[in-house]
Image (cartoon, rainbow, N blue to C red):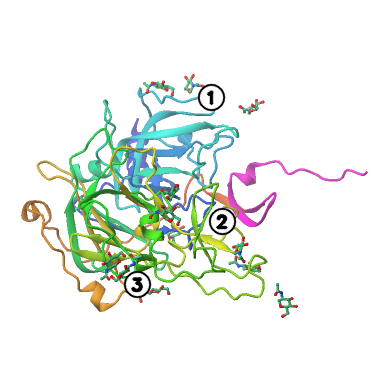
Amino acid sequence: MAPFFLLAPILLGYAVRAASPTWISLNLSVPSTISDVEINANYVDVLVGTPPQVVQLPIDLQTDAIDVYSSDCAFCPGWDFFDPSLSTTNKPNDRVLNGTNLFNGTWIYDTIGFGGIVESPDIDIGLLTVMSTNYTNFRIRNGGLGLLTNTFRKDPINRLIPRLYESGQLIDPVIGMRLDPSNPRLTIGALDPNDYEGTLNWVELEPDNGDWFKYNVFKIDGFSGRNGSLLPFDDNLLTAVDSMYFDISIPNNLTYFNNTNYTGPVFSINDTVDGYNLDPTFFQISYPCNTSSLFPNISVPHPYVDFSVHINGVSYMIDSDDNLLHQPSQFSPNGFCNVGIVSTSDKITTEPQSVLGLPFLRSVYLAYRFPTGSCPGFFGFAFPKGLNRTQAQVSQTPRATPTLSSQCLSLTRPTSTPIVSRPASPNSASGNYAVYGEDGVQVSLSGADLLVKGIWNATF
Ligand SMILES: *[C@@H]1O[C@H](CO)[C@@H](O)[C@H](O)[C@H]1NC(C)=O
Ligand SMILES: *[C@@H]1O[C@H](CO)[C@@H](O)[C@H](O)[C@H]1NC(C)=O
Ligand SMILES: *[C@@H]1O[C@H](CO)[C@@H](O)[C@H](O)[C@H]1NC(C)=O
Ligand SMILES: *[C@@H]1O[C@H](CO)[C@@H](O)[C@H](O)[C@H]1NC(C)=O
Ligand SMILES: *[C@@H]1O[C@H](CO)[C@@H](O)[C@H](O)[C@H]1NC(C)=O
Ligand SMILES: *[C@@H]1O[C@H](CO)[C@@H](O)[C@H](O)[C@H]1NC(C)=O
Ligand SMILES: *[C@@H]1O[C@H](CO)[C@@H](O)[C@H](O)[C@H]1NC(C)=O
Ligand SMILES: *[C@@H]1O[C@H](CO)[C@@H](O)[C@H](O)[C@H]1NC(C)=O
Ligand SMILES: *[C@@H]1O[C@H](CO)[C@@H](O)[C@H](O)[C@H]1NC(C)=O
Ligand SMILES: *[C@@H]1O[C@H](CO)[C@@H](O)[C@H](O)[C@H]1NC(C)=O
Ligand SMILES: *[C@@H]1O[C@H](CO)[C@@H](O)[C@H](O)[C@H]1NC(C)=O
Ligand SMILES: *[C@@H]1O[C@H](CO)[C@@H](O)[C@H](O)[C@H]1NC(C)=O
């Protein structure tokens, strides 16, 4: 037994449960532009198991679950897989994952942490073991990091971020996030004053409602375009944010697109065609954005999508390039670029009436004060520091302050930034390899050194 006890502290040297409340600032990998064909996911390094395996997971603001793909999952897409057999803290979990023969897995418990600074044991994790080539839903890469703390589960799961807070490892029950490609960042446990500028504009989240199709719903004033007036939708539109959604949905897209007071001038090819194009198949609105065979000898000016979201008296400009104005793709007509402003589906008769996806999250700073005790949840909005916002934009002040501010929103300003470490993963790559059929793509391949080399000496 003695050797075990001698060994144990060394093995447990990986245990990084913070001794006193702290916070963490993580770099993210975000797409440089919004693509019609990609999922446009935003990845963060998550440490799973003991010793920690680094898994880059897409941030998902609309689920509370953490999913990883098992290293033996044949057609799971991505580059970081989790090998539970290498983890000493991996435990079985009775929870049933109601899979299908195309998409299946098991629940497990394991330790999850960030940056060697904080971690929590026994987090419920969805371990995907089957994703058939016939599975036709979005094939999200690597898994998912759900950041919600409130969903309707009859049998709630152990959720990472609340656990970190309840175990005294975080300074405050907050996360901060900016997804702009210039300096994407996720902080947990505190908000970093280096990440945002302007007044934090806090709005209280609505009490959860099982009938809504999104979580963390809040009220906004509305939307404006070129002339600055609010579009004529309901006051106090119920709205959600979604980091896995590449558009902004509003109650009716044509209210905006049909009026140049809102859109501003849109280049028109000829007098018979409106500036925009409404694709009859996808009902997607697109703007002429490129000289093409469709417009011979016409130089098409670069379009600008003029659109702002108004929240509690503050107007947040949404960037056009690489955001609302998508890149040309097979889903846009030749010479046109899709515009990421759509109608909240006519089929959805329930709230919220509007969903703010990536074009919004890439243009603002978002703070999330998750609910604890008698405090409800809040979102706080500000301007990402270093983005080219004007002084007039940044100096706007919120119309009202939430009534529970002093109880729930007195946050500690962090003084120093804990240093993030990125351990060498036991499942880590042994090299980069080209992918058959994908020009220029290199992926890391775990355990490639264990493969027996093929000998190609056949003669034909
Ligand atoms: C964060 O930075 C580290 C060190 O530069 C890098 O290895 C890692 O891939 C980055 N993570 C993401 C999600 O971009
Ligand atoms: C499991 O999935 C099936 C098919 O999707 C569904 O009908 C059933 O209600 C689910 N059961 C549970 C417990 O979620
Ligand atoms: C999903 O996986 C579980 C656990 O391996 C298994 O019991 C179940 O039968 C599978 N479901 C389907 C539909 O294949
Ligand atoms: C995929 O679908 C095809 C056609 O329906 C079927 O023949 C094949 O067996 C399926 N493959 C898997 C792995 O389910
Ligand atoms: C937008 O314009 C189209 C075509 O001119 C018209 O059919 C439609 O009714 C208008 N929609 C709105 C909401 O104004
Ligand atoms: C902006 O346009 C809308 C719709 O045409 C109009 O109702 C509103 O009065 C305009 N606002 C200004 C400031 O001109
Ligand atoms: C645009 O705004 C101007 C000034 O407010 C107004 O006179 C005009 O009718 C508006 N145009 C449309 C199409 O609503
Ligand atoms: C206007 O342009 C569209 C293509 O964008 C074309 O289909 C239509 O025939 C053109 N009309 C005239 C009068 O040139
Ligand atoms: C614009 O059109 C030209 C010629 O049609 C094409 O070569 C180029 O790739 C297009 N640019 C974009 C951004 O689609
Ligand atoms: C475009 O310009 C070229 C030369 O500048 C000319 O030969 C061609 O006929 C023009 N095409 C059209 C459709 O006007
Ligand atoms: C834009 O609005 C029209 C009319 O309501 C609708 O048919 C179309 O589906 C909408 N397009 C998108 C992309 O939401
Ligand atoms: C910031 O830059 C983008 C693209 O370079 C531009 O479209 C936008 O108008 C600028 N914003 C401000 C407030 O100047």
Q: Is residue 342 above or below residue 76?
A: below
Q: Which of pointers 3 and 2 indicates the residue nearer the eye?
A: 2
Q: Position of residue 275 (x, y in %)?
A: 49, 65
Q: Residue at x 41, y 45 (%)?
A: 52
Q: Is residue 1 above or below residue 213?
A: above
Q: Is residue 276 above or below residue 206?
A: below
**Which badge, 3 or 1, is on the more N-terminal residue?**
1
Amino acid under disc 1: Asn
Magenta part of the protein: which range? 433-460
Report whether residue 27 is seen.
Answer: no
Label 2 environment density (alpha carbons within 10 Å; few <14, some 14–19, many ≥20): many
Ligand 12 within 8 Å of disc 3? The answer is: yes
Residue 332, numbered circle:
2
Residue 372 on the magenta segment:
no
Q: Which of pointers 2 and 1 indicates the residue nearer the eye?
A: 2
- For the residue labelled by badge 1, is the local secondary structure a helix, a strand or a loop? loop
* Side of 441 relative to 99 (left or right): right
Q: Quadrant of residue 457?
A: top right
Q: Which residue is mark 3?
A: 387
Residue 439 on the magenta segment:
yes
* Side of 369 relative to 109 (left or right): left
